[in-house]
Image: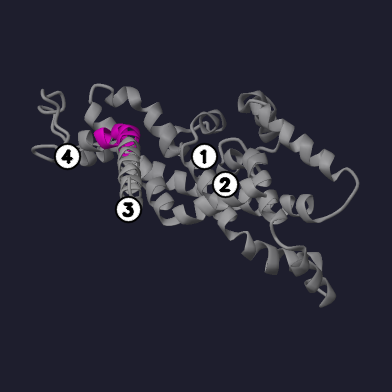
Amino acid sequence: MTAHAVKRAGKVRTLVKNTLLYLVMTAIALLMVFPFLWLLSTSFKTASNVYAFPPQMIPNPATLDNYVGVTKMVPIWRYLKNTAIITALGVGLNVLFSTLAAYPLARMRFPGRDIIFGALLSTMIIPNGAGMIVNYMTLRTLRLTDTFLGVVLPSAATIFSIFLLRQAYTTIPKELEEAARIDGAGDLFIWWRIMVPLIRPTLLTVVIFDFMAHWNSFIWPVVVMKSPDNYPLAAGLLYLQGQFSYNFLYLAAGTVISITPMIILFLLLQKYFINGVAGAVKG
């Protein structure tokens, strides 16, 4: 076999290999996204064709009546407002406190630093439910039950966020910090003007994770809030599920409304999300 034939056979093998790989990846992607596509399709269907056979992936006819109906049946806009307040407050507190807590664990030298970091990581194995009673008793003593601050205060600084941000801090060259100190900069100035801008991808990753956690929170808001009017959207929909359990179309429309903000946020920040996770793993 000539060299040209060997080279051509190699190109054919590479083409076949890549084609099979893309087909498998496409099939896996379709399998993963199919439940959402089916939910989205169902939210636009009429009652007569939701159980039609063969199943309709593209609704015919398509209607917005389910979205109009669910907004009339439950106070969904009030739930969205409550969710936005809880999410904004929770994400803001977690980013601020976790960024401050991770900085000394990564950049400062003091006795017991590694032991403190190891102790913090070890608490990640404790189930969230184990701390509910203690957190509720604390909030009741502080008279913060049935408040938005009470919902977000127990997660104002999460160990996972501290871990991600600490790993991002460790990737920053020490020369930058030393040059700033030679110019007379203090720790707070170095943290805010040098460190925080350089870990922006990881910060945005923390924002995405924390946004999803607070937007989808259900059990803890139900425990803290006494009035259903103060529930976030996820808790409100599940709490009222019994009211429209007979109407799967309304449930589909309400679910699509609840997850749309998360999809938009992820699409806007996905490149920072990938960079942030990769930086944390390397660190």
How far is disc 3 from disc 4 in space, using C-alphas? 64 Å
- Residue mark closest to the camera, 4 vs 1: 1
**Magenta segment, which residues?**
26-39
Provide the secondary structure element on which disc 4 rests: helix
Q: Amino acid at mark 4?
A: Asp
* Residue 242 picture quarter: top left
Mark 3 and mark 1 lie on one chain; the one further toward the N terminus is: 3
In-front residue for pair 69/248: 248
Where does label 3 land, which residue?
4
Residue 84 place in picture, x, y as percent? 46, 48
Mark 3 and mark 2 lie on one chain; the one further toward the N terminus is: 3
Q: Residue at 75% x, 37% y: name it.
A: 120
Where does label 2 land, which residue?
90
Provide the secondary structure element on which disc 1 rests: helix
* Tag 1 and tag 2, C-beta contact below 8 Å: yes
Provide the secondary structure element on which disc 3 rests: helix
Where does label 4 land, which residue?
65
Does residue 252 appear to the left or right of 204 in the view shown?
left
- Categorize mark 2 by other alpha carbons within 10 Å: few (<14), some (14-19), many (20+): many
How far is disc 2 from disc 4 in space, using C-alphas? 34 Å
Q: Main secondary structure of the magenta part?
A: helix
Quarter of the N terminus within the rendering: top left
* Residue 15 picture quarter: top left
Q: Residue at 42% x, 35% y: name it.
A: 234
Q: Amino acid at mark 1?
A: Ala
- Residue mark closest to the camera, 3 vs 2: 3
How far is disc 3 from disc 1 in space, using C-alphas? 57 Å
Where does label 1 land, which residue?
213
